Image (cartoon, rainbow, N blue to C red):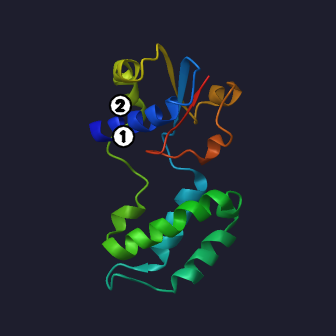
Amino acid sequence: MKTHLFEFISDIRKNQKNNSKPNLRIYISKEFPTYYKRSTELIALNYDAENKSFKKVKGEILQEIYSDDLVSKSIQDAQKVIPHILNNLEKSQDLSVLSCEFDFDEGNLFLENTHLFKKELKIENIEILSVQDSKTKEISPSPKNLSSIRPFYPQFIFY
């Protein structure tokens, strides 16, 4: 968990060099987007756990996923992520890569360590917002596509 925290602080610091705005807003997601969940369901249906192989060619699986109604609404996000999930499953042969459950709460991790963000980044005002909170959509400025934020891939903006 701490590794995730410090890697994220490092990512922010890299972007901070080109920014003079004094405030930081971090956007986290407490659940995977609909397209992601549906894609992992379809992958699981197309994977033979006993033989540790796909039931179809990966290209056919991708086509099935991309044409699904729940996935096609977020096709650009899906095209960035889903091939990696397929490849991870093929390499690891471990169905846990399809899990949409996680061991810790990223939002709580960040909230409990706000002092580290402030110390490491030398920023006093830091907000941590969940994209599932309806009020988050009303706050401006915000990232362009809040719905593409997924657990463990938070986004941030300086304002």
Give the label on residue 68, or none.
none
Q: In this view, does 48 lie above or below 138?
A: below
- Whether residue 15 sits left or right of residue 73 in the image: it is left
Q: Name the residue under label 2.
A: 109
Q: Is residue 1 visible?
A: no
Quadrant in the rendering for residue 109: top left
The CA span between labels 1 and 2 is 13 Å
The residue shown at (61%, 65%) is 79
Name the foreground residue: 4 vs 29: 4
Q: Which of 147 and 134 is in front in this view?
A: 147
Q: Say whether residue 57 is left or right of residue 110.
A: right
Which residue is depicted at the point 68% across and 27% down? 141
Which quarter shows the C terminus?
top right
The image position of residue 22, as x and y in percent, is 55, 17
| SS of the residue under disc 2 | helix
Disc 1 marks which residue? 7
Q: Which residue is drawn at 49% across and 72% down?
A: 43
Which of the 4 image quadrants contains residue 3? Answer: top left
Farthest residue, direction left: 2
Q: Residues within 10 Å of mark 1 (few under 14, many from 20)?
A: few
**Label 2: how many residues lie within 10 Å, few (<14), some (14-19) or many (20+)?**
some
- Asked if labels 2 and 1 touch by Cβ distance under 8 angstroms, the answer is no
